[in-house]
Amino acid sequence: MKVRLLFFASLREQVGSAGEEIELPAEVTTLAGLRVHLMARGGAWGSALGDERRLRTAVNQELATSGATLRGGDEVAFFPPVTGG
Amino acid sequence: MKVSIQRDEFDAGAEARALSRDTPAVGAVASFVGLVRDRNDGASVYTMTLEHYPGMTEKAIAQIVDEAKGRWEIIDCSVIHRIGELRPTDQIVFVAVASSHRRDAFAACEFIMDYLKSRAPFWKKEATGEGARWVDARASDDAAAARWAPTPTKDRAA
């Protein structure tokens, strides 16, 4: 299945991308699996996504936890803890 | 209800007055304005650039306001958050709540601010005397949001 990835703030700068469409291997079905899949790219991906305490995720614009199941066409965002207000 | 994510400056007084002008049932308007400080974590701040997640931001704020409406009597409210490059003394955020009585207005305004700081997808990057840096989330902001009881408690006394 295909999902759309988005990266924000320090994470966007670390991985050098604001987003991409990605075709997932059949075994990647959850947010946790997607994170591991992206970290396997190595380099900045491993460090940017490696520390769960400094990582927040959203699926289809709703905050989501690592167990969330992914579906084709989902919009998945990775970002650091928010600092607005 | 007004939610606006914008680059432009806003007039906090006019925004607060707009909540009660045509609504005689409003007996109290509580408002909050957040500003860019000239110092943060020991460094001089020259500019602050705010980024957000378009689409999710508006949804997250609408959910926060809905949650506040379940807890307090809210007649109307307004949330404005600026994005882009700001400077010390610039306004960043405005929250105002109109209610019949002050207690609901005060509490809902503080609740919306606390939740906005820990749940709405905004990020701040500072240009400082020591270089550019992303602002770190503060544990105290999570604690501020966590102190609100998870179950709605509508208290109409004022």
Image: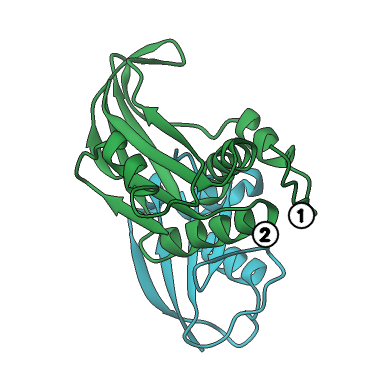
Chain colours: A cyan, B green
Q: Which mark is residue B70?
A: 2
Front-lying residue, B26 or B96:
B26
Mark 2 chain:
B
- Residue B118 image point, x, y percent: 57, 44
Query: Seen in the image, is A28 located left or right of residue A41?
Result: right
Return the residue at label 1: B152
Dot 2 alpha-carbon crowd within 10 angstroms: few under 14, some 14 to 19, many 20 or more:
few
Q: Are marks 1 and 2 on the same chain?
A: yes
- Residue B38 image point, x, y percent: 32, 15
- Above or below, A65 relative to B95: below
Q: Quadrant of the C terminus of chain A?
A: top left
Disc 2 marks a residue whose amino acid type is Gly
Mark 1 chain:
B
Label 1: which secondary element: loop
Disc 1 marks a residue whose amino acid type is Pro
Query: Seen in the image, is B107 located left or right of residue B9?
Result: right
Front-lying residue, B123 or A72:
B123
Dot 1 alpha-carbon crowd within 10 angstroms: few under 14, some 14 to 19, many 20 or more:
few
Mark 1 vs 2, N-terminal side: 2
- The residue lying at 58 percent from left, 45 percent from top is B115
